[in-house]
Image (cartoon, rainbow, N blue to C red):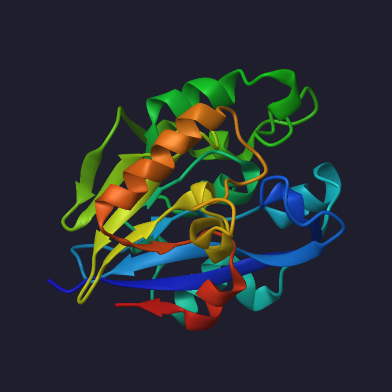
Amino acid sequence: MTLTITALSVGRVFDLQKPSLTYLRGWGETLDIPLIMFVIQGGDAPVVVDTGADFARAVTHHGIRMEQTPEEHPEAALRALGVDPADVGVVINTHLHWDHSSNNHLFPNARIVLQQREIDYASDPVPWHRRQFEHLPELTAAWRRAEDAIDPVDGDAEVAPGVSVVALPGHTPGSQGVVVEAESTRYLLAGDCIDLYENWAGDAEYEHIPSGFFTDIVAYKHSLGLIEKLGCEVVPSHDPLVVERREFR
């Protein structure tokens, strides 16, 4: 069995304040970032990691400048890769923020793998995090459209041959990464624990830089240490260089 990973752009966000991605760094700078859906092929059925935003809802409710071409709609991007959404066997959400989980319902035959802690928190977040989880009086969170398909896990677990989830709390309580034993390399799809390559590379002061958004910075530090021990090539969740490379083998 030979697994490959393809990074598909499923939309873009413009003019995001950089400190929201690099903790206390980049004041006055803005970034344009992709929303990325990863497709793992080569096993019994395709595995999708993160499903992006529902743009019709996002533009109205999240107040940021975004764009999605017809080719970037998740269904269109998958079909261009030769994947029918109905054939996807597993969907993994690295966490339940709206830009990572809003299209779970497009995969009618997939089980959706989430940490139980993430489901619990997304169902009742603190007030300052409610918008990220779409836990709002006027809005039912998009991830709930496929809630019946959720297959919760507690901690690390293999979800398909060569594909495992690993708990990486900090960005959110139930954040998880996805370890993929690909053809030539062991990869970690790190979710928003690592937004950009810059987060992992660090700077002159710190070995790694957290995202600007987190629920528990102490747990985050532990997760960064865990990633160091995994021996994986780290793949960030929002770096344009990931989309440019596209294929990870």
Left/right of residue 23 with respect to residue 236 in the rendered view: right
Residue 31 image offset from top left, x and y in percent? 76, 65
Could you say which quadrant of the image residue 46 lies in?
A: bottom left
Residue at 50% in and 47% down = 193
> Residue 208 or 122: which is nearer the viewer?
208
Quarter occupied by the N terminus: bottom left
Does residue 218 sit above or below 22 in this rendering?
Answer: above
How many labels, in total? Answer: 0
Residue at 46% in and 29% down = 219
Residue 116 image offset from top left, x and y in percent? 39, 25
Q: Residue furthest front?
A: 204
Residue at 82% in and 54% down = 27
Does residue 241 sit above or below 200 in this rendering?
Answer: below
Left/right of residue 153 with respect to residue 238 in the rendered view: left
Residue 223 image offset from top left, x and y in percent? 40, 39
Res 139 seen here: yes
Residue at 85% in and 47% down = 60
> Residue 142 or 169: which is nearer the viewer?
169
Could you say which quadrant of the image residue 135 lies in?
A: top right
Residue 152 image offset from top left, x and y in percent? 34, 30
